[in-house]
Amino acid sequence: MSNDTGLSYCGEDIKKNDYDRYLTCLFAKDFARENLFTLYAFNQEIAKTAEVVSEPLTGMIRLQWWREAIEGIYEGSPRKHLVVEALAKAVKDHGLKREKLDEFINAREFDLEDTVPQNLESLEDYVEKTSSALLSLATDITLKKSDLDKGVNEALEQACQSMGLAWGLLGIIRATPFYAAKKRIFLPQDLMSEHELNTSTLFELKSSPELRAITKILTEQIKIHLSKARRLSGEIPKPAKSPLLLGVLADLYIKRLEGNNYDPFDAALHHPKASATWKLMWANICSRY
C-alpha cells in the first residue's frame, strides 16, 4: 500500500516520525529498503506505547497485543494490521529471529515504570536492549545469508551494540525536554545527585548548568561508543553499513551540543542540517559511518 508520495505506509510513517533513520534507509540496497521501513515502523509502534496509554496496565496490554502479533507471524497467521502484515514479509524475506523481536518488546516495559536509571550502566543496559537491538535487526535485513560468516557476525554485533549505545544515549539527550514535559526523567540518578540537578527546574522546561554538565558527560560517553563502532568498520560488509550511517548524523548533533554548551533544550537538536544528506552520501561512497 502506497500513497501519492510513492512511499508505503511504513515508509511514510518513518519519514514523518523518525526522519534520521529514514535518511539512512535511502542508502540501503533496494531489496532491503522497504523492510527497513517496516522494522522502524514496528519500532515506532512499540516505542510510543508509554505515550499513548493513560496507565501502565493499559501499556502492558498493548505490548502483549504485539507479542501475540509476533506469535501470529511465526505461526503463519499475521493479524490484519498494516505494520504487522509488512513485518510478516520482512520476517519471511530475511529470516528474522523471533527471540530478537520478543526481547525487543520486553525491553519497552521499562518505559511504563515510574523509575529512574540508577546509574549510567543501568541506562546503557536499557539502551542496548532497545537501540542496539534495533540496529542488530536492521543489519540482519541488509545482508543476505550468503554474506554472513561467524567472524562477520561477531564484528557486526559489536558494531551494532556500540553504535546503538551512541545513538540511544543521544536520543535520551534529545528527548530530555519531551520527557520533562511528562515529568519523566531518563538521566542517571547518580549523575543527577552528584551534580545536584534541580528536577523542579527541569520540569519547568528550563535548562541549567547542572543539566548541561550531565549532558556533557553523556556526550563524551557517546563519543567513546562511536569510536568503538568505527574501529570495526573494516570488518563490516558494505551493505550492512547503511543502518550504521546514524553515526554520521550523531556527529552533526554532537557538534550542535558542543556549540550550544550542551543544552538539550536547543530546538536545533531535533532537525538534521540541510547538509546531512550530502554527508551521508559521501560517507556511503567512502564506506564509512
Image (cartoon, rainbow, N blue to C red):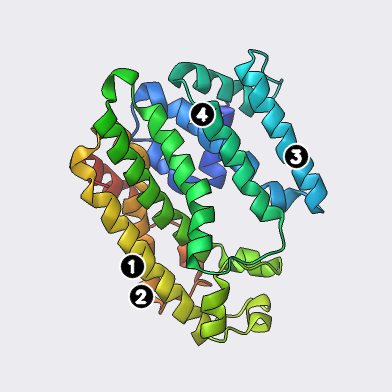
Residue at point 49%, 71% (across, down): 266
Q: How many residues crowd around disc 3 within 10 Å: few (fewer than 14), some, or many (20 or more)? A: some
Sequence order check: which comes first, mark 3 or mark 1? 3
Task: Identify the disc placed on residue 259.
Answer: 2
Task: Identify the disc placed on residue 132.
Answer: none
Q: Is residue 154 above or below residue 176?
A: above
The type of residue carrying mark 1 is Lys
The type of residue carrying mark 3 is Arg
Instruction: Give the percent coordinates (x, y) of residue 241.
Output: 30, 38
Sequence order check: which comes first, mark 4 or mark 1? 4
Q: Secondary structure at mark 3?
A: helix
List the residue tagged with mark 4: 7
Relative placement, left or right, of 108 versus 284 is: right
Q: Nearer the viewer, mark 2 or mark 4?
A: 2
Q: Nearer the viewer, mark 4 or mark 3?
A: 3
The type of residue carrying mark 4 is Leu
The span from disc 2 to disc 4 (Cα, nearest Å) is 36 Å
List the residue tagged with mark 1: 255
Near-viewer residue (91 or 266): 91
List the residue tagged with mark 3: 62
**Proximity of marks 2 and 1: CB atoms separated by less than 8 Å:** yes
Instruction: Give the percent coordinates (x, y) of residue 22.
Output: 45, 41
Q: How many residues crowd around disc 4 within 10 Å: few (fewer than 14), some, or many (20 or more)? A: some
Sequence order check: which comes first, mark 2 or mark 4? 4
**Proximity of marks 4 and 3: CB atoms separated by less than 8 Å:** no
